[in-house]
Amino acid sequence: MRPDPTPSKKNQEKQVNTDTEPLKGTFTSVLLLGAFIVVCWVAVFALFLNRA
């Protein structure tokens, strides 16, 4: 017989816990990058309004 390709529930729970930890840092990085883009856009728009 071939071994079961699906991991046991214990392994799945460990994978879920370890997989979500790096995603917290990724989410924070994406938020910071988005905030930086918005700040840059607002600054350029303010320059545009001041020169008009």
Image (cartoon, grey):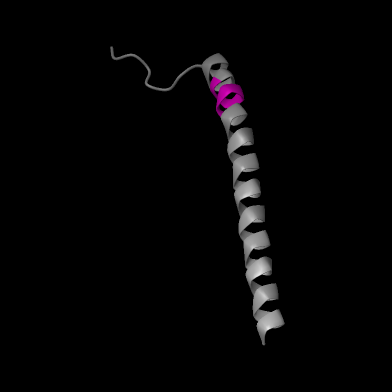
Q: In this view, does 22 lie above or below 46?
A: above
Task: State the residue lying farthest toward the bottom.
Answer: 52
Placement of the C terminus among the 4 image quadrants:
bottom right
Q: Main secondary structure of the magenta part?
A: helix
Total number of numbered labels? 0
Which residue appears at 61% of the width and 34% of the height? 25
Which residue appears at 37% of the width and 21% of the height? 5
Taking depth in this image into account, of 16 and 27 the one nearest to the observer is: 27
Q: In this view, does 11 lie above or below 21?
A: above
Which residue appears at 57% of the width and 30% of the height? 22
Which residue appears at 42% of the width and 22% of the height? 6
Q: Is residue 25 above or below residue 14?
A: below
47 sits left or right of 1 in the view: right
Magenta residues (range):
15-19
Q: Is residue 13 magenta?
A: no
Taking depth in this image into account, of 21 and 51 the one nearest to the observer is: 51
Task: State the residue lying farthest toward the left.
Answer: 1
Q: Is residue 16 magenta?
A: yes
Placement of the N terminus among the 4 image quadrants:
top left
Taking depth in this image into account, of 16 and 5 the one nearest to the observer is: 16
Image position, residue 14 (x, y; %): 57, 18
